[in-house]
Amino acid sequence: MNRKFVEMMKLLNIYLNHFPRHEKYALCSRIRNTAYQIYDLITEAQKRYHKKTTLVNLDITHEQLRMQMHLANELGYLGYKDGRINVDEIGLQSAHRYIAISTLIDELGRMIGGWMQADKGKVLS
């Protein structure tokens, strides 16, 4: 899971660096902090014996990241390059970026869901 998170974070940082300047300390910063919080929760869940609460918090934080990226896409921020709107490729580039990052976020979510199911099965055994 750590490897998948790092792969997602590398791509996410590239995209966040292109956000418009007026969003650098707002939505961009919030997305980055939410992603780092996910990493913290992954680490915490790996170390805890009783994982249920941590995994629920991880799942909630993952959903927050997914919704924040959806908002960024709806606001058109994924179509920016170097802080400016890229008029020539706005639709194509924005769609490509959103699909690429959403795929990684969804894969991470499936891993979290599997982890939750495995932990639930462990408790029942």
Image (cartoon, rainbow, N blue to C red):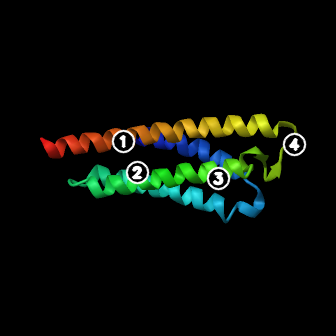
Seen in the picture, residue 75 relative to 92 is either above or below; the reply is below
Name the residue: 30% across, 49% down: 46
Q: Position of residue 123 (x, y in %)?
A: 16, 46
The extreme right residue here reads 88
**Residue 113 circle label:** 1
Q: Amino acid at mark 3?
A: Leu
* Real-space CA distance between mark 1 and mark 2, rounded to the nearest whole angstrom: 8 Å
Dot 1 and dot 2 residues touching (CB under 8 Å): yes
* Real-space CA distance between mark 4 and mark 2, rounded to the nearest whole angstrom: 36 Å
Q: Amino acid at mark 4?
A: Val
The residue indicated by pointer 3 is 71
Q: Amino acid at mark 1?
A: Gly
Dot 4: element = helix
Give the mark nearest the N terminus, 4 or 2.
2
Q: Residues within 10 Å of mark 4 (few under 14, many from 20)?
A: few
Name the residue: 63% across, 35% down: 99
Name the residue: 64% across, 53% down: 71
* Real-space CA distance between mark 2 and mark 3, rounded to the nearest whole angstrom: 18 Å
**Residue 87 circle label:** 4
The residue indicated by pointer 2 is 59
Give the mark nearest the N terminus, 1 or 4.
4
